[in-house]
Amino acid sequence: MTTSPATYEASPIKRVRATKAEVNERRSALYDIVAAMKPMTVRQVFYQATVRNVVEKTEAGYTKVQTDLVQMRRTGELPYSWLADNTRWQRRPRTFDGIEQALEDTARLYRKSLWADANCYVEIWLEKDALAGVILPVTSMYDVPLMVARGYASLSFLHSSAEQIGELKVPTYIYHLGDFDPSGVDAGRKIEQTFVTVDLGAAAAIESDDITAAMRDAQRNVAIAKLSQFETECLTLGGMAQRNPRRKQEVVDCLYGIATANNLLSDHGGALIEDLIAAGLGFGA
């Protein structure tokens, strides 16, 4: 007895492939964007492309930009140096062939501090680690410290900076560069708030009180940006909970409540949500 192979109906989904002319037109637009604003991250290029209606503001649109930029670099259409990736870097101690080479390098790389006799002190704080490669060349040129907070700055990072600033005899000016959204604005406010005191115990008390406000902000932010923002809030609230263990269960309950209210558990699976929360609390791989 023989059986005929299973047959499948054609998919009702009609996928429209871009023509070669449309791809070339899109890549030309991407080239113009990067040429005008280099160096840029891939996500920066994507955002600029969406506001110019080059691609749609979806994961599919981001994939188009990412794929085009890869192909453009491989074919030589786009210089590799025009795109920045600060999320991956090499760790290696600096070594020399001998004392003579060490002295030569020291003389060649010597820079006099531009702020030694200044009547103020300046720091640039950056919310997004991915943008450090874009900002660093400018801050380095002017000998200004670049502080990469990666979202909400940790209490240890804030405290060490506050201690250094507390030893200065001149006024300090801090400029926070972040997203103009509730989370980005609040991250800047938290820096200022924590700098009110350089006492670790007092700063910890301030942050503990702020967990309530941060959880309230997280509920609003995730309702807007869903999964991508939920991951950010897991890291933010998880970090705060690690520094305030007595409120850890409260934070976990809050995050599960946010995931449930925004259908993240049903849309993306409980395992992923659990992994994100665990990573935020420091239990991730």
Image (tube, rainbow, N blue to C red):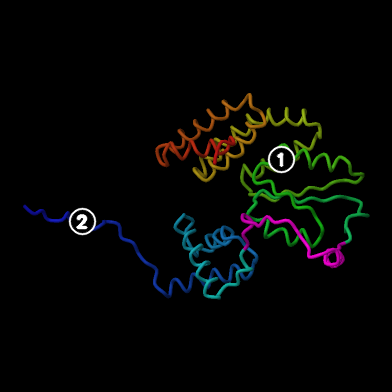
Q: Which residues, given as a range, are shown in magenta?
A: 84-111
Residue at the front extreme of this rendering: 98
Is residue 164 inside the magenta stretch? no
> Looking at the image, which residue is at 78% across and 38% down?
195
- In this picture, is 235 found above or below 178? above
Q: Mark 1 points at which residue?
A: 189
Q: Main secondary structure of the magenta part?
A: loop
Labels 2 and 1: the sequence-earlier one: 2
Which image quadrant is residue 167 in? top right
In the shown orientation, is residue 98 left or right of residue 76?
A: right
The three-letter code of the residue at mark 1 reads Arg
> Looking at the image, which residue is at 23% across and 58% down?
10
Q: Name the residue under label 2.
A: 9
Which image quadrant is residue 118 in? bottom right
Element marked by disc 2? loop
Q: How far apart are marks 2 and 1 (CA)?
A: 57 Å
**Measured from the top left, where is residue 250 in percent x and y?**
57, 26
Quadrant of image for the C terminus: top right
